């Protein structure tokens, strides 16, 4: 099943790129976020959104989430531009590669000349990126942190060759290693700060993971959608089930899992065995939920050591 078959999807080309008309303002990340927000409203795509961004799309979706936190349900970064990087971070990488400030400036000049032949929209974004980079990416971080939503970061670890016509003013291999190490560190922290975050490094792909390993990109999107999607079918089991006057089984939900906690005992995550039967492998027990003709849960049966104990749902 494709992503489009599982959820409504919206893909677009930013202003001045592909079939989209040129923009009316400089393509700052803040402006791009505002245009995307307007676009989603115009096409009738209601929030919350799972946003997927590749390369420069990383800081775009991060700023969108920080700007409209209540409208975002999850984030998928595909080899994103490091929007957490500072001038000191960049300098540390260049120094490890033996590149001076003059070397950086000469490389920037060569790239600028090459990009002048690119389509106007692409060239405009490159100029904007170059401006922000020289400012230590401060504008990428200006909107603040994104909300704590399910998050996946996919990083490409396969070395990318230099484009034809570009000579690197230092040790390119050392530059690549230092850059990757820093990206792993930065995005590892980003994923760790999210209560439902994951970082995946693939050595099979470079920058275009979605082209070389589309199945990995699909996995990341599906993972975030799954974690971000409510599970109303589990809500009917949530409640209190008194077994005796002083002993109650409480059933709660943690995302797509049911959690059991008996009076005076630790909470235990249950494993679904059927639509109404869940096992507690740690103690060798099974919970069988009872339902009425309408599917409403009326009680449960605790099966353990051959003994069956029934409890009526109290609330």
Image: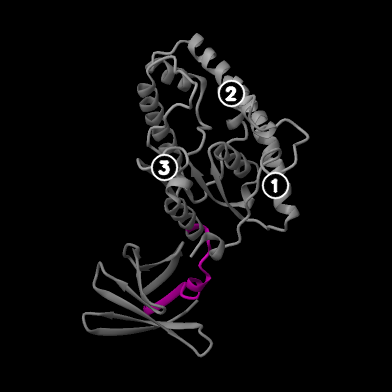
Decide: is 14 above or below 252: above
Q: Which residues are magenta?
A: 227-245
Decide: is 13 above or below 234: above
Q: Residue at x 62, y 28 (%)?
A: 126
Q: Residue at x 46, y 75 (%)?
A: 237
Q: Secondary structure at mark 2?
A: helix
Other residues around mark 2 within 10 Å, as few (<14) / some (14–19) / many (≥20): few
Q: CA distance from mark 3 to mark 2?
A: 38 Å
Q: Which mark is residue 114?
A: 2
Decide: is 267 above or below 87: below
Other residues around mark 3 within 10 Å, as few (<14) / some (14–19) / many (≥20): few
Q: Which residue is mark 3?
A: 192
Q: Residue at x 38, y 37 (%)?
A: 157
Which x, y percent locates residue 63?
Answer: 61, 39
Left or right, residue 310 beside residue 111: left
Q: Which mark is residue 294?
A: none
Q: Is residue 190 magenta?
A: no
Decide: is 124 above or below 105: below
Q: Residue at x 51, y 24 (%)?
A: 86
Other residues around mark 1 within 10 Å, as few (<14) / some (14–19) / many (≥20): some
Q: Which comes before the other along the chain, label 3 or label 2?
A: 2
Mark nearer the viewer, 3 or 2: 2
Q: Which comes before the other along the chain, label 3 or label 1?
A: 1
Which x, y percent locates residue 228?
Answer: 52, 57
């Amino acid at each position: 099943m494709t992503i489009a078959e599982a959820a409504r999807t919206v893909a677009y080309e930013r202003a001045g790129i592909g079939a989209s008309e040129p923009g009316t303002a400089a393509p700052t990340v803040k402006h791009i976020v505002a245009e995307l927000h307007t676009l989603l409203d115009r096409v009738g795509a209601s929030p919350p959104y799972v946003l997927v961004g590749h390369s420069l799309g990383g800081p775009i979706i991060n700023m969108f989430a920080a700007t409209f936190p209540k409208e975002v349900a999850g984030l998928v970064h595909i080899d994103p531009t490091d929007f957490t990087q500072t001038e000191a971070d960049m300098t540390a990488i260049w120094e490890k590669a033996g590149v001076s400030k003059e070397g950086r400036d000469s490389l920037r000049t060569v790239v600028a000349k090459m990009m002048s032949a690119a389509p106007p929209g692409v060239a405009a974004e490159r100029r904007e990126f170059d401006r922000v980079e020289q400012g230590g990416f401060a504008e990428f971080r200006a909107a603040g942190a994104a909300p704590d939503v399910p998050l996946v970061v996919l990083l490409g670890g396969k070395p990318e060759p230099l484009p034809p016509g570009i000579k690197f003013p230092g040790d390119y291999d050392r530059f690549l290693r230092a850059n990757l190490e820093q990206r792993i560190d930065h995005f590892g922290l980003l994923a760790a700060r999210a209560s439902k975050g994951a970082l995946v490094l693939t050595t099979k792909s470079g920058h275009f993971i979605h082209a070389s390993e589309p199945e990995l990109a699909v996995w990341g999107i599906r993972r975030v959608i799954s974690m971000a999607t409510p599970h109303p079918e589990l809500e009917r089991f949530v409640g209190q089930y008194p077994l005796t006057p002083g002993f109650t089984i409480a059933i709660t939900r943690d995302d797509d899992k049911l959690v059991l906690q008996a009076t005076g005992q630790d909470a235990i995550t249950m494993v679904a065995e059927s639509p109404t039967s869940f096992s507690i492998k740690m103690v060798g027990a099974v919970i069988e939920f009872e339902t009425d003709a309408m599917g409403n849960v009326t009680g449960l049966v605790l099966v353990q050591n051959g003994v069956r104990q029934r409890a009526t749902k109290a609330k």
